[in-house]
């Protein structure tokens, strides 16, 4: 330890209430050799700070012995953007050599973070993917969420997500059919469609077995999903729009010979149609 850290240059840490002015000063005067800022990270961090979802951890801000900012620029920019004073651990006398290991490990996935935090029980990739598809809807952009936001939304919409996953299982015969996009539509419909009706639609879509000629729209949707690619933004939106059209037709007792893309959301989430 002493070989790398002389007695007067031992690493120190203190808990500091970092104000927006303090963060701006540090960024202006000490941020001289950091990586390019990723605006999307700053946006997510600042959103958590404004919404009181930011949590104090061992991670914080790190300065070199010469008071050069080594780690924490995204957190500092988020403090500035949020306008909030945030408690953080501030480390000083961290050697430049530390950059060889800071942020060099494999990043944790969203499910890794949520399962370590233990706020939502055991969270799966299917749950997170279904939630994002449900929230994205017909939008060209699936929302990028912070772990705190995903945790809160799973508490809010968890029953709908669980229903969609349970009734649209991931099995070999449903490749391309029971995807996150399909589950996202069913999770939305959970709030406005009778659950028995929705469960029957999922069962028929999964098996391809219908009980009458009037339910051909389910078979048609199944064939459509099997034939169209699931990757790519345009494909995702088109598939989502056709799933919604088919489900709307099924619920309304219609049996179209073709499935066109809807142009507006057929199954708004609670409160969404009031925005």
Image (cartoon, helix red, strand yellow):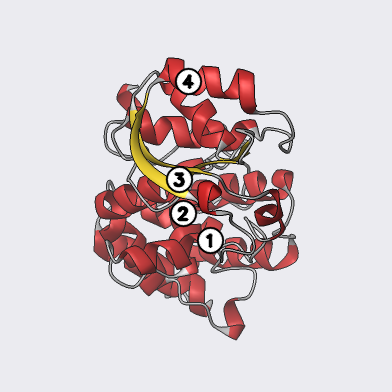
State if disc 1 and disc 2 touch (CB < 8 Å): yes
Determine crowd level at label 1: few under 14, some 14-19, many 20+ residues with C-alpha closer than 10 A. Answer: many
Circle nearer the viewer, 3 or 1? 3
Please identify the quadrant where the C terminus is shown. top left
Q: CA distance from mark 2 to mark 3?
A: 19 Å
The x and y percentages for residue 60 are: 46, 44
Residue for point 46% across, 77% down: 169
Label 4: which secondary element: helix
Q: Which residue is under mark 1?
A: 180
Which comes before the other along the chain, label 1 or label 4?
4
Q: CA distance from mark 2 to mark 1?
A: 6 Å
Which comes before the other along the chain, label 2 or label 3?
3
Q: Which residue is under mark 3?
A: 146
Which comes before the other along the chain, label 3 or label 1?
3
Is residue 27 something one can see in this rendering? yes
The x and y percentages for residue 8 are: 52, 47
Q: In this picture, is 149 found above or below 36?
A: below
Q: CA distance from mark 3 to mark 1?
A: 19 Å
Which comes before the other along the chain, label 3 or label 4?
4
């Amino acid at each position: 330890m002493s070989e790398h850290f002389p007695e007067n240059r031992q690493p120190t840490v203190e808990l500091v209430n970092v104000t927006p002015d303090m963060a701006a000063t540090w960024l202006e005067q000490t941020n001289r050799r950091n990586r390019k800022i990723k605006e999307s990270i700053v946006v997510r961090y600042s959103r958590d700070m404004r919404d009181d979802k930011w949590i104090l951890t061992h991670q914080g801000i790190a300065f070199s012995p010469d008071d050069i900012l080594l780690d924490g620029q995204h957190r500092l920019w988020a403090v500035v953007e949020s306008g909030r004073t945030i408690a953080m651990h501030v480390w000083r006398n961290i050697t430049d050599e530390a950059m060889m290991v800071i942020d060099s490990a494999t990043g944790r996935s969203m499910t890794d973070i949520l399962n370590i935090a233990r706020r939502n029980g055991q969270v799966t990739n299917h749950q997170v993917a279904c939630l994002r598809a449900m929230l994205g809807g017909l939008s060209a952009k699936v929302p990028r969420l912070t772990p705190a936001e995903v945790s809160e939304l799973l508490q809010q919409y968890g029953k709908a997500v669980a229903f969609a996953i349970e009734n649209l299982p991931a099995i070999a015969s449903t490749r391309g059919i029971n995807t996150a996009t399909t589950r996202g539509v069913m999770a939305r419909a959970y709030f406005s469609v009778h659950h028995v009706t929705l469960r029957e639609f999922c069962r028929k879509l999964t098996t391809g077995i219908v009980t009458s000629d009037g339910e051909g729209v389910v078979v048609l949707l199944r064939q459509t999903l099997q034939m169209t690619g699931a990757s790519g933004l345009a494909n995702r939106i088109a598939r989502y729009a056709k799933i919604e059209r088919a489900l709307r037709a099924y619920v309304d007792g219609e049996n179209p010979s073709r499935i066109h893309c809807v142009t507006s959301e057929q199954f708004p989430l609670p409160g969404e149609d009031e925005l």
